[in-house]
Image (cartoon, coloured by chain):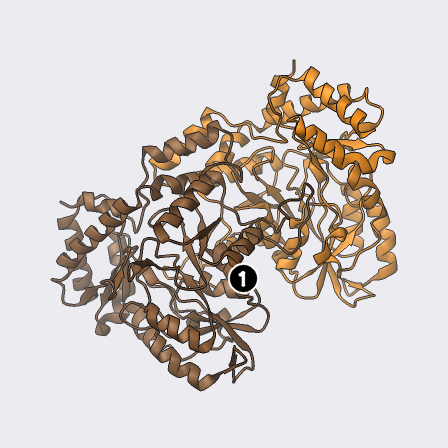
Chain colours: A orange, B brown
């Protein structure tokens, strides 16, 4: 069966696209990228001094509506700083979805906190807030504005919802749950630059949001990330922490806490800037590609393509095929077959609850995640693929 | 007095150099930098995939003689990973000089370790190994190959000597002390790319060494660093940890420990590569600048210029004036005066033992450091200044 499925998918790509190879996701760079980089060299401003960091941050602010944007050298760094700002420390638990890139859980560990893994829903792979509410009612109690895990006695301080592949989680339920259980919200919007819920950009609903500009993202800085927030105090703290916690007005090297070397260099910001100025075009192309895929994959009965959630406008970062339940054990073989045909696709992330080094951490059952993640295949999603359609 | 001293220094710069402003340290970029960056854009390889990371690492290996080079996104990241590889964890002490950039001590903290501050000598500002030996004999004991701090009961696991401003520490004494007290050596060569001791590159004497390619360094990647070592096992572990600890041969996203997102992107490596291929020219120019400074500053009686240590060949990263002892309280005013005249200079780093948030950590007396650091003024040191001499 996996041969038949593989072949039908391969045929779609072969008949519909002109290509020698199709990568999973490549950035949309052009002459302006070269131009801005050249400018960095000419002005000898490739590092922390230079105009592009501010310009890039302003464009992110324009797009997301976030009042404050603090760029970082990776999305992981942005998550780490966000967890510090949520005051996550030793013996603090943080709710993290079982289905996510590992950085979400690692960031909690960097602060010596404890990831507490929760299940996802099977429509868009975000946290299942209904299920989580029932679970928290059972295992947690709110005392003096703190959420306490009755089983461990530890505080549950924060929740990190992930907008998987660019699809917004159910924001309304997130906000209501977090309010009831006094949870600090860090929205992991690493996948979701250009994704909106009710016309508001994701990452701006919680206390903090983070973005990623990694190489495979809709726009890239080579590596990079950002913390976005409307909270002035948190923004100020974030700026301080990413810049080694050096006292700003001091001529000398005085630092007032353990800080980090997480700033985005000017050269990486210049690269990001060259793309964010055309982000609306990029998003349009990605949506167009989705609509094309939707049409052509509708013919295949053994899978569906992931559409955007209600009330949402996804960036369609990674286009996603979801195999029917009965084929969940075939995905690895199908992926191998596609890759052999130079159609580079990838599986869903391994579940956090399946990683050995996280085995001792608390978790609710991950039944839906377990039934879902092996059915996921991310397919070529570069915005410029739309120009390669036959 | 500070006016007289300031004016004499200002006069030297004004009469000897053509300039509108003199920055502390700028990189030596050129057309090849633009060319290599352009190549990254053209090949759509700006992130973790691309040829420049490997090429850059090979050139670092050629220069340093280190068998293994693992580039990172900052020198701080390289220090962090090195501390992890030294197995620094909760309740482990690490010997750190009181006079260094804060990252050296922070890296220990990132691992939940405890920096234990030690004094420096006043000739080149490296750790005073003679004084340290006397101190360790008093407070520490070696039991079963472990060095134990008798006062705290904790293990002293490692030592991080810093090659300050590019001047090698007394390597022979470092090695003998570390052998006697069973200390893992992480050489902080963040300042010292191109510095040699007995014709061997610094960073290659200890178990691990780290380099920095920050914006103000002899060569820059915008931001960046590297771990260098001759130990295959440590190198393999480092490569794994900087790349999120993802299992290499897995098609899926399987991680076997808490890892980090510390890799150097291709675009930053391309920038570094464009400079390291001319590193010998850069070092020559920096040495020539030193010799020029040495000659002209010899006329001033109230200071000396820092020369290179015995048996060493310094990269002269930051050229350094050292005020005579009696003027140590004038340096801030002198620095201010120079900066007002667009000669950008900077003071020595604040001592680690003077930072409030480190106040609870163990330390030996820092008498020499305290008597020395306020006398330090780093002066303009860009390699291309040699071309601005009148």
Q: Chain of mark 1?
A: B
The 10 Å Cα crowd at callout 1, few under 14, some 14 to 19, many 20 or more, is: some
In the rendered view, tell whether residue A131 sits above or below residue B162: above
Could you tell whether A360 is left or right of A344 in the image? right
Q: Position of residue B77 (x, y in %)?
A: 50, 55
Callout 1 secondary element:
helix
Q: Quadrant of residue B375?
A: bottom left
Identified at 64% across, 31% down, the residue is A24
In the rendered view, tell whether residue A43 sits above or below residue A76: above
Could you tell whether B261 is left or right of A252 in the image? right
In the rendered view, tell whether residue A325 sits above or below residue B13: above
Q: Nearer the viewer, residue B291 or B325?
A: B291
Q: Quadrant of the N terminus of chain B?
A: bottom left
Q: Residue furthest top?
A: A390
Could you tell whether B202 is left or right of A261 in the image? left
Q: Which residue is mark 1?
A: B85
Q: Position of residue A193 (x, y in %)?
A: 63, 36
Identified at 75% across, 60% down, the residue is A361
Q: Position of residue A141 (x, y in %)?
A: 83, 62
Q: Position of residue A179 (x, y in %)?
A: 77, 52
Residue A376 seen from this side: no
Q: Nearer the viewer, residue A13 or B222?
A: A13
Could you tell whether B66 is left or right of A140 in the image? left
Identified at 68% across, 41% down, the residue is B251
Identified at 34% across, 78% down, the residue is B130
Q: Quadrant of the C terminus of chain B?
A: top left
Residue A16 seen from this side: yes
């Amino acid at each position: 069966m996996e041969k038949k499925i593989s072949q039908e998918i391969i045929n779609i790509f072969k008949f519909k696209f002109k290509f020698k190879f199709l990568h999973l996701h490549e950035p949309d760079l052009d002459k302006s990228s070269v131009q801005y980089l050249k400018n960095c060299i000419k002005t000898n401003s490739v590092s922390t001094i230079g105009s592009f960091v501010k310009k890039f941050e302003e464009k992110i602010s324009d797009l997301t509506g976030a009042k404050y944007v603090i760029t970082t050298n990776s999305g992981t760094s942005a998550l780490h700083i966000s967890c510090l700002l949520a005051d996550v420390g030793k013996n603090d638990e943080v709710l993290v979805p079982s289905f996510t890139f590992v950085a979400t859980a690692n960031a909690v560990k960097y602060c010596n906190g404890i990831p507490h893994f929760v299940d996802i829903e099977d429509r868009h792979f975000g946290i299942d807030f209904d299920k989580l509410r029932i679970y928290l009612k059972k295992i947690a109690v709110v005392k003096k504005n703190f959420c306490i895990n009755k089983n461990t006695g530890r505080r549950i301080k924060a929740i990190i919802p992930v907008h998987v592949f660019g699809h917004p989680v159910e924001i309304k339920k997130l906000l209501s749950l977090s309010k009831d259980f006094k949870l600090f919200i860090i929205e992991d919007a690493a996948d979701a630059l250009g994704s909106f819920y009710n016309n508001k950009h994701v990452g701006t609903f919680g206390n903090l949001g983070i973005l990623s500009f990694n190489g495979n993202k809709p726009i890239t800085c080579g590596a990079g990330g950002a913390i976005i927030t409307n909270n002035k105090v948190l923004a100020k703290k974030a700026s301080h922490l990413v810049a080694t916690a050096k006292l700003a007005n001091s001529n000398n090297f005085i630092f007032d806490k353990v800080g980090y070397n997480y700033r985005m260099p000017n050269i990486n910001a210049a690269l990001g800037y060259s793309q964010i100025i055309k982000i609306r075009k990029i998003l349009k192309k990605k949506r167009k590609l989705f609509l094309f895929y939707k049409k052509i994959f509708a013919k295949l009965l053994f899978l569906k393509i992931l559409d955007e959630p209600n009330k949402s406008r996804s960036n369609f970062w990674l286009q996603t095929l979801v195999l029917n339940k009965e084929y969940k054990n075939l995905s690895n073989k199908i992926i191998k077959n596609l890759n052999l045909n130079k159609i580079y696709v990838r599986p869903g992330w391994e579940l956090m609850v399946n990683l050995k080094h996280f085995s001792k951490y608390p978790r609710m059952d991950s039944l839906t995640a377990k039934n879902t993640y092996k059915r996921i295949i991310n397919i070529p999603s570069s915005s410029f693929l739309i120009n390669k359609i036959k």
